[in-house]
Image (cartoon, rainbow, N blue to C red):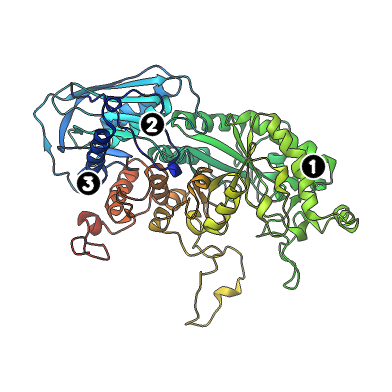
Amino acid sequence: MAYFNFKVILFLSSKQHHKMRGEKTFFSFLPLFLVSLLFFIFISQTTATNYPINVWPKPTTFNWPNPKSISLSPNFTISHPPHRYLTPAVYRYLHLILSEHHRPIITPAINLTSYKPLHSLIISISDVTSPLAHGINESYALSTPSDGSPSAYITAETVWGAMRGLETFSQLVYGNPTRVAAGVYIRDLPIFAHRGVMLDTSRNFYGVDDLLRLIKAMSMDKLNVFHWHITDSHSFPLVIPSEPELAGKGAYGNEMMYSPADVQKIVEFGLEHGVRVLPEIDMPAHTGSWAEAYPEIITCANMFWWPAASSPALAAEPGTGQLNPLSPKTYEVAKNVIHDTIAMFPDLLFHGGADEINSACWNTDPSIQKFVASNGTLSQLLEIFINNTLPEIISLNRTVVYWEDVILSANVKVNPSLLSPENVIMQTWNNGPNNTKRLVTSGYRVVVSSADYYYLDCGHGSFVGNDSRYDQPPGTDQGNGGSWCGPFKTWETIYNYDITYGLTDEEAQLVIGGEVALWSEQADSTVMDSRIWPRGSAMAETLWSGNRDETGMKRYAEATDRLNEWRYRMVARGIGAEPIQPLWCVKNPGMCNTVHPFTS
């Protein structure tokens, strides 16, 4: 039988913090030196070769000793254990495999064997009960036969690992008539447990179908967290059953709301694709939209964001308003929002925002002015808010994610002693690896979304009107073109970023993953796909299997051709990913490099 039942033990660095435990393998009975030798030989075959068919993100191990293909039977089937979410995934992939007929830009130089067609893919799962949650085992092994055997195999610890294996198998299939890579052996697992995309749906609205398409693309790239920044100062599109006026008055319109039924559809779709939906209700700042329903709990609501050049701005950008921590009504409303949101979203993480507290905004309120005059501080004000809301979230069996500002802001921040690392995860966005270092040395688990590398909205200029920066004499240095986080983050910038840079092995274990972020001041559904993909795919590979080859060298050069091909396949699957090179470069691999690959 073509299926190899041996397993390779991956000696990953402690930064990757993955272990394969309790497995008796073929290698268990060999002397250590022989195990090391076989492992070295296997790895040298897997990572150093650029195969005629590739998978994105690149698997941890990929072995194809004799590249060739085998026909896929028109009656091809997939057998699997029944499962609420795996079953629809299997049906989806079966349809894709039989109907996609992917035509690679460059026809793979591999022969079609004369063996009988592949008739089935058999999925075996050790644990069919574990729910999708942070840290779930996503590993899988995949083999396709090379000797005429009728079946290919996927083995996985969980259904979520099996979904990753299904995606990999689908990328090994191509052509019309359909064929599949034969004699492939893959063992695969991600380096980082948290691999996500953050999308802001407050500044501009995205329809439910847009969010489903995003989740679909994330699943293709083996990303597993949709961080949904639902509300902000600009609009409140989420319907809260106990507080219907928040969306009723705070949304852009009746057709620009997310009902509980919409949320359920999005969450269920995510589970069918192995993607968790992590909700964010940003507070106490970024809450101007709450004022449409409850003006009495919002400070500096609906004020011009920068009253005069000589005075401080009331917000980081147009759209003012912050919750007043001194108002009892604030907590009545906020706790209703927290309870109803958590009831709609089953994920065990809840994002509480807590970024960009604006001192000037709070200082416009008479009750806060009195508090400060009595020797109170704005940091104490934020602590009052956190002390009233954090225990509420924790009591609902949620771990809280906050933006780094809550303890790293230069102006308004809380004492870290109030935020136990056991119950709180930090998300970093400023100062690249420096802030990551500060957070992990304080003992916090960290999600990295560094604006210097992972902010996908950067480089499109400023969105404010009558901006004098754009009225300069010809020849003036354009700088970042008005974009605070410019320049544009290229896919190579994203691909080459190591999110544990500068950390010790022990510190790196606290980095649970990363997210690319699309803030929507200048984005909506018309550009969502092209802003996120394939740059999001670049991050996806680095968080799944890294950005270096077995020698430790960055592999962005060989990744270029693979990403070109992957982008082409994503477009064929209905995702409007932008091109990264002219088609000529794609059809002439290596010819668009800065240095000739055979002379460097």
Q: Amino acid at mark 2?
A: Ser
Whichever of labels 3 and 1 marks the residue nearer the N terminus, that label is 3
Q: Nearer the viewer, residue 200 or 166?
A: 166
| Position in image of residue 65 (x %, y %) | 17, 37
* Kind of element beneath mark 1: helix
Point out which mark residue 330 bears.
1
Identify residue type, mark 1: Thr
Residue 241 visible to the viewer: no
The first of marks 3 and 2 along the sequence is: 3
Measured in 3D between alpha carbons, the distance from the residue under mark 1 to the one under mark 2, in whole angstroms, is 45 Å
Inter-mark Cα distance, 3 to 2: 22 Å
- Crowding at mark 1 (Cα within 10 Å: few <14, some 14-19, many 20+): some
Going by the picture, which residue comes out furthest to the top? 82
Alpha carbon separation for disc pair 3 and 1:
59 Å
Of the residues tagged 3 and 1, which is closer to the observer?
3
- In the image, taking residue 554 as reference, residue 147 lies left or right, namely left
Counting labels gives: 3
Circle 3: is it few (<14), some (14-19), or many (20+) Cα within 10 Å? Answer: few
Report which residue position mark 3 lands on: 49
Residue beneath disc 2: 139
| x and y, in percent, of residue 476 in the image | 50, 81
